[in-house]
Image (spheres, grey):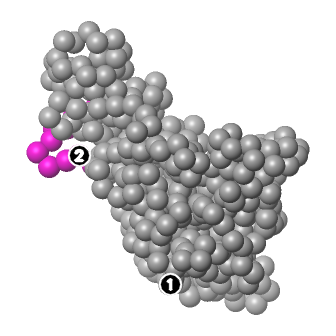
Amino acid sequence: MHHVILGAGPAGVTAAETLRGLDPDARITLVSGEPEPPYSRMAIPYLLEGGIGESGTYLRQQPGHYDRLGIEVMHARAGGLDAASKRLFLNGDALPYDKLLISTGASPVTPPIEGANLPRVHTCWTLADARRIMELADRSAPVVLVGAGFIGSIVLEALYERGCDLTVVEIAPRMVARMMDDVAGGMLKRWCEAKGLRVLTNTRVERIAKSANGSGEELRVSLSDGGTIPAQLVVMAAGVRPNVGFLVGSGVVVEAGIRVDDHLRTTAPDVYAAGDCAQAVDLSTGMHDVLAIQPTAVEHGRIAALNMGGRRTRHRGSLNMNVLDTMGLISSSFGLWQGVQGGASAKIVDEGGWRYLRLEIDGDRLVGAQAVGLTEHVGMLRGLIQTGLRLGAWRDKLLSAPERAAEAYVALAQGMTGHGWTGPRTKTPV
């Protein structure tokens, strides 16, 4: 049996290790599209800050880890897939497989901005990107960060820690608009500004040009409000899209991502998908969506590998969740944080104390939450949403006092309410 895993991020590495545990004799080929050891993109900001070296980004730290497991690591790019003949085309050559996992992740989106291809304009997605940024992001260097979504806000902190003179430009009306409401996003913006950053929301970059002196050592960033900002470096963090272009004509159905069933199988025989390229079930909605977060990628990789190895295991859905540390201010969102039609909402706001909590309840279940500056609530909120515990009498208590969420979780988990406790929904093989 030859298992080929295309993509060496968290999903691919987890899948390779899981398959080896299932079958000590199988041939396992892990294909990386970059000339690096398998690494975590989420560790790149720590590299930029100087907290770790490049080896600190590697998913497995022990030398010879993959060799000891008998996992062959290749460095190649996929150019196509013939699912009918079970051949994957890498750098023009055909690699036969018995079962294939596609875990190709995503790539940054470059917005259609004039000058976005100039030198000193970079994304922050790969180790190669990080090396270029570290060459340019000197202390006090003027840097413009385009995008203040989840990824942009992680990069923001790294650039701040490097001591850059940082301006953040975000086209949306608030920071991390896909994770936070106006209250939380506004609080995060004010926190950044209090730290000395310039944050421009509702603002678009119109053009990037070389400075008038033509030296190429400085850029001029023109904004939709008519302003112009000098920059030694422009970092693009305007979103990502799944790496699925090589699947054209393969028979694998692609929508927002690669469509998979509840066993992470694609529409092609013996082809599975996992991670940021997979459109799998969202636990909160029951709909198929791309949840591009590392915990989901790891979960996908494990479950896909179990199914590839003959251990039929159902994926019951992943929870949409984000936790962000922005220069010491922790913010988080879980599930249906914007609420549901006909649902109930409760919130507490302490602007001066940098604290905010919002709960979204549907019937007698907590279905979504946001928190700023309340780290002790993170695990409890996730637990209440992910397990689907019935709140019973705690519903009204939380609507009047949402800060009691941790107390509610402890009580409900111990089965103390007597109001419909059914136990958590567990992910067990079926």
Read off the residue under disc 2.
339
Residue bounds of the magenta highlight? 338-350
Q: Amino acid at mark 2?
A: Gly
Image check: 377 left or right of 42? left
Q: Amino acid at mark 1?
A: Gly
Which one is in front, 176 or 288?
288
Which one is in front, 322 or 402?
322
Read off the residue under disc 1.
249
Identify which residue is drawn at 42% across, 44% down: 314
Q: Quadrant of the N terminus?
A: bottom right
Identify which residue is drawn at 75% across, 89% down: 213
Q: Nearer the viewer, mark 2 or mark 1?
A: 1
Crowding at label 1, few (<14), some or many (≥20) Cα neighbours within 10 Å? few
| Secondary-structure class at tag 1 | loop
Q: Position of residue 359 (x, y in %)?
A: 27, 35
Disc ID at residue 404: none
Q: Is residue 372 visible?
A: no
Identify which residue is drawn at 47% across, 78% down: 251
Q: Is residue 243 visible?
A: yes
In the image, residue 348 lies in the stretch drawn in magenta = yes
The image quarter containing residue 325 is top right
Q: Position of residue 42 (x, y in %)?
A: 64, 51
Identify which residue is drawn at 34% across, 45% down: 283
Q: Position of residue 282 (x, y in %)?
A: 36, 50
In the image, residue 277 lies in the stretch drawn in magenta = no
329 versus 111 height, above or below: above
Residue at far right of view: 63
Q: Do the residues bearing badges 2 and 1 touch, measured as CB atoms within 8 Å? A: no
Image check: 410 left or right of 135? left
138 versus 347 height, above or below: below
247 versus 196 height, above or below: below
Earlier in the chain: of badge 2 and badge 1, it is: 1
